[in-house]
Amino acid sequence: TFESRTTYQWNVPIPSMRLLLLNSGPVATLACGDLNSPLTGADMSDTESMVQDGDNGILIDSDIIAKISQSEELADEFGTEDNSTLRVIDCEGKAIIPGFVDSHTHLLWEGDRSNEMQLRHKGLTYSDIAKSGGGIQKTVDFTRSASIESLTKLGQRRISRAFEFGTTTMECKSGYGLTVNSELKLLEVNQFLSEQTPMSIHSTWLGAHDVPKGTNMDDYVDELINVQLPAVVEQGYAEYADVFCEPGWFSLEHTELIVKAAKKLGLASRLHVDEFVDGGGLQLATELGAISGDHVGHSSESARQSASDSGVMQTFLPGTPYILGHNLETPLRQCIENNWPFSLATDFNPNCRTLSMPFVGSLATHRLGLSPIEALVAVTRNPATTLLNSTPGQQVTGSIREGGPADLLILDSQYIDAWCQMPGDNPIYRTIKSGDIVN
């Protein structure tokens, strides 16, 4: 049970309190077209449809945006001072954007692999380091021995940090246990964090992250399909299944077996593919009907077109090649030019230790050719469409609109573009999650 755990003290007002934002600068609503579908191509930079200029006000009632109007109108109707049921924030011209949706993270793990940088400088590849006892297996050893309590505290601290950087929704993977009990433990902690913190968490089972020491691939795939997957589904916390489909790890054939078994048990898939080479992973993800193909730095143009045609989201993780010292090789402009839907995420993990979506946005704009508004769509509206909640009445996040979820950010700037222009600083002035101020 979780009864003995220390609960992080989140700074949130009482649920009955309404929140009124006055005197804001521009608001990036991103609320155009079908909100259940991603934006592509020129629509990702259509500021006329996605941005409200001028003196704006937003009224939040509980966890819903109740009204968006001119600031003066809302001030006349509701007042400008706090009272017993209303909290007022004067935004002083600051811009407002949707909360970030980080659709690819490895939130829970224990241990430290900071020494691997010097190994890469000596010429060792990711695969070399793994074979020498580092990489995923090193993290697995530390994570297996970690208690539920220590993992919970780690998760709470990391979620608090993510809130500081403006993330309000996260996909969180298991994958550093590689046994039935340890994978279930990670998913259990994910579930606890989703219930006890304001963060919206979507859990993914990643038992197929690597092959545990002392086990061969065929035997482990058999265990994944016949032991781990049924246990995970019975537990009921995971929404998705994932496989590290890459030469040297899980082959196309093994990935197909695992994904089809997961689908039979009711789990959709989100797949690690084509991170180091074009291994045909994105094409397989498309054929298997995956929700997303992630990393995809080396996928072929034909695979990208097939993914787009089939509604498979390409999720780029530019922080990872940056941290590994690789060329970024992330064809974001090509996606824009071809109207291929794509998202951006952090890939927070022991190698890529950042929970900052503004840092990802900096890479996308400073190095990969996106405009700030295009990058903003890729970290809010687009990934939100891949994490649609099946709960009746639950609305998709990633935009700012009347009747929509109150997940939004007040920037420390009068310009929307500032969200990704401070790579060594934090552009977020306030994070509001479900109507509560959480940073």
Image (spheres, grey):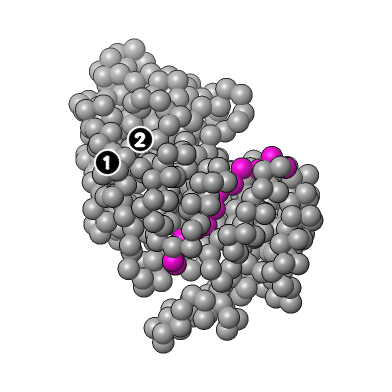
**Residue reaching furthest bottom?**
122
Q: Answer with the quarter of the image where residue 327 lies.
A: bottom left
* Residue 400 can be seen, yes or no: yes
Vertical relation: 422 (above or below) 170: below
Query: Residue at position x 58%, y 81% from top?
Result: 131
Per the rendering, the mark at residue 39 is 2
- Looking at this view, is 175 or 22 the one in front? 175
- Which quarter of the figure is the C terminus placed in? top left
Residue 150 appears in the rendering = no
Query: How would you rate the neighbour count of disc 2 (Cα within 10 Å): few for under 14, some for 14-19, many for 20 or more?
Result: many
Distance from Cα at disc 1 to Cα at disc 2 = 12 Å
Question: In this view of the protein, which residue sits in the foreground, 377 or 423?
Answer: 377
**In the rendered structure, which amino acid carries the disc numbered 1?**
Ile
What's drawn in magenta, residue-wise? Answer: 265-277
Picture mark count: 2
Residue at the outermost front position? 302
Q: Residue at x 74, y 73 (%)?
A: 215
Amino acid on which the number 2 mark rests in the picture: Leu
